[in-house]
């Protein structure tokens, strides 16, 4: 099987399908998995790299940024999304060995942007932190009192 010069040829991983799969790095060298403890796993096996606790993550287009979203448990919108710059040739930014515990742990890291997610539910990163898409959900409820007698 061949691939174009700027593409990677398909290859089999040593790991079984992961139902908690959250994303694959732009070069395919890592995949994100986990629910409470998100980590990056090499597809050919090896030691997982802790990313964060109770957050969601994804690479921006082009793989130059890793976006970490922190919000309270059970909260659909709100919280913060932090875009961390990734050095050329790397798949991940420099992170603490145990991963990031909260948005306040980002002090001193290579933060490219901090995005307030108030009233935004779904976040999709773009080619750089100033360009992104989101879903803003509005819920309107009518409360009726229905007599059962």
Image (spheres, rainbow, N blue to C red):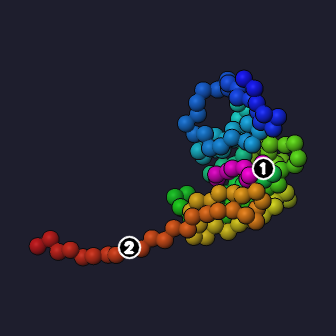
Q: Which residue is mark 2?
A: 141
Q: What residue appears at the point 82 percent right and 34 percent down from the top-left corner?
A: 5
- Compared with 146, 5 (above or below) is above
Q: Which residues are magenta?
A: 55-63
Residue 131, position as x, y percentages in the image: 73, 64
Badge 2 element: loop
Q: Quarter of the image containing the C terminus? A: bottom left
Q: Are marks 1 and 2 in contact (CB under 8 Å)?
A: no
Residue 86, position as x, y percentages in the image: 83, 50
Q: What residue appears at the point 78 percent right and 34 percent down from the top-left corner?
A: 4
Q: Residue 81 vs residue 84: left or right?
A: left
Q: Residue 20 vs residue 28: left or right?
A: left
Disc with the residue nearer the chain's start (1 vs 2): 1
**Residue 105 shows up from this direction:** no
- Compared with 37, 121 (above or below) is below
Q: Nearer the viewer, residue 99 or 40?
A: 40
- Compared with 84, 22 (above or below) is above
Front disc: 1 or 2: 1
The extreme left residue here reads: 149
In whole angstroms, how far apart are the C-alphas of marks 1 and 2? Answer: 41 Å
Q: Nearer the viewer, residue 126 or 19?
A: 126
Label 1 environment density (alpha carbons within 10 Å; few <14, some 14–19, many ≥20): few
Q: Which residue is mark 1?
A: 62
Numbered label attached to residue 42: none
Q: What residue appears at the point 60 percent right and 26 percent down from the top-left corner?
A: 16
Q: Quarter of the image containing the N terminus? A: top right
Label 2 environment density (alpha carbons within 10 Å; few <14, some 14–19, many ≥20): few
Q: Nearer the viewer, residue 72 or 77?
A: 77
């Amino acid at each position: 099987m061949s691939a174009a010069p700027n593409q990677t040829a398909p290859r089999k991983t040593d790991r079984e399908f992961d139902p908690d799969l959250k994303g694959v790095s732009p070069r395919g060298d890592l995949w994100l998995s986990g629910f409470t403890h998100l980590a990056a796993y090499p597809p050919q096996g090896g030691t997982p790299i802790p990313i964060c606790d109770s957050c969601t993550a994804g690479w921006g287009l082009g793989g130059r940024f890793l976006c970490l979203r922190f919000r309270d448990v059970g909260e659909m919108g709100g919280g913060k999304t932090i875009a961390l710059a990734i050095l050329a040739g790397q798949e991940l930014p420099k992170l603490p060995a145990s991963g990031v515990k909260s948005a306040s742990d980002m002090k001193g890291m290579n933060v490219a942007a901090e995005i307030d997610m108030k009233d935004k539910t779904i976040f999709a990163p773009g080619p750089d932190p100033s360009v992104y898409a989101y879903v803003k959900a509005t819920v309107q409820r009518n409360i009726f009192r229905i007599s059962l007698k």
